[in-house]
Amino acid sequence: MQTILVTGGAGFIGSCLVRQWVAQGDLRLVNLDLLTYAGSRTSLATVADSPLHTFVEGDIRDRELVARLLAEHRPTAMVHLAAESHVDRSIDGPQRFVETNVVGTFTLLDETRKYWRELPADQRERFRFVHVSTDEVYGALGDSGTFDELSPYQPNSPYAATKASSDHLVRAYHRTYGLPTITTNSSNNYGPYQYPEKLVPLVALNALDGRPIPVYGSGNQVRDWLHVADHAQALRKVLDQGTPGETYCIGGDCEHSNLEVVHAICDAVDQLNGTAGPNSCRKLIEFVADRPGHDWRYALDSSKVHEQLGWKPTTEFAVGIRKTVRWYAENRAWVDEITGGNDRRGRLGLDC
């Protein structure tokens, strides 16, 4: 049975991937996560007792720990999702993003290279290092066009710059040392178990509670939206079928402005609570000062992963948003646990 080492597997995307893989039932997972503010073992409650899942609390920058896990568990692949990921927090405090996203990725690559180099030839051939990144490394688009795997990097936030740096390190370790790495760049994810600082859960929870809903600037910034379960399925395809040295853009082919997303969430809450018409939670929307350096539009061309790996998203946005809103309404205990009861739910990065 194969063993996969997953980093960041208690986070939003990582925990979804872990839950899917454990349900699949044909491989072992070693899950390394530092359990920073956005990660929680509660997100792994459904797999906590599975013999196929081993959780390790630790830092990807800890060389000795990474080396020990590789030596003890002898993984056939690594899927690297551990990262600081919130643009607003990177504006307020970029150092942590450099330490985790750049130094942490370097540490993983370097220890994995040593481990991979000592594997028997057939195991070296099969080994994979999948690095999960973001479309934000490409910068911003105008009103038309899409990014693809050949688009130049033009990151505009400290978060995007650190992810771009980690992407370059991954590519360099393939070209220089032959390490069989694969990089993915995905569009905006949404779904259950996402920390409530991000747009979708923040708006959903504020709307459910009748609290102000902050929207940056005009709210007309456009993003490509992808359900987290679809993204996790794509990552599994990339690991199983992807080519070392390649990059795959994973998008939802689902562009909406931030304001359209907020309206969709409000409509879902109204439907759930019976508050449509003059009592709609749309009246809670408040336009606030825009984020510094806010990118205008992101969109991905996912034709490569469609054509070469046979993956396409299956979750319709309207359905996914309704299910996501209902999940947050029914899982307030998870929200309270991961936030430690802090219900500030404001936006960061406004005062820089």
Image (cartoon, rainbow, N blue to C red):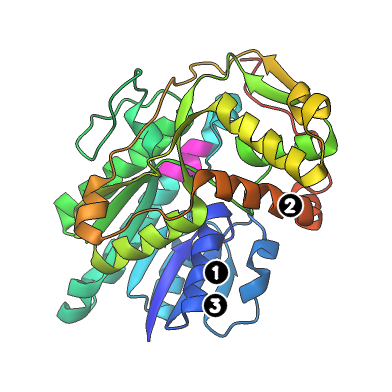
Above or below for 56 versus 289: below
Mark 1 in CB contact with mark 3 (< 8 angstroms): no
Residue 307: x and y in percent read 20, 54
In terms of secondary structure, where does tag 2 sit?
A: helix
Camera-side residue of 225 and 35 = 225
Determine the residue positioned at 46% across, 31% down: 223
Above or below for 158 versus 123: above
The magenta segment is 97-102
In terms of secondary structure, where does tag 3 sit?
A: strand
Q: Earlier in the sequence, mark 1 or mark 3?
A: 1
Q: Name the residue beneath numbered marker 3.
A: 53
Q: Name the residue beneath numbered marker 2.
A: 338
Q: Find out whether residue 100 is within the magenta segment.
A: yes
Magenta region's main secondary structure? helix
Q: Earlier in the sequence, mark 2 or mark 1?
A: 1
Instruction: Tell me which amino acid carries mark 3.
Output: His
Determine the residue positioned at 16% across, 59% down: 178
The quadrant of the rendering that contains the C terminus is top right
Determine the residue located farthest toward the front in the rendered image.
277
Q: Earlier in the sequence, mark 3 or mark 2?
A: 3
Judge from the rendering whether residue 187 lies leftward or rightward of residue 284; answer left or right.
left
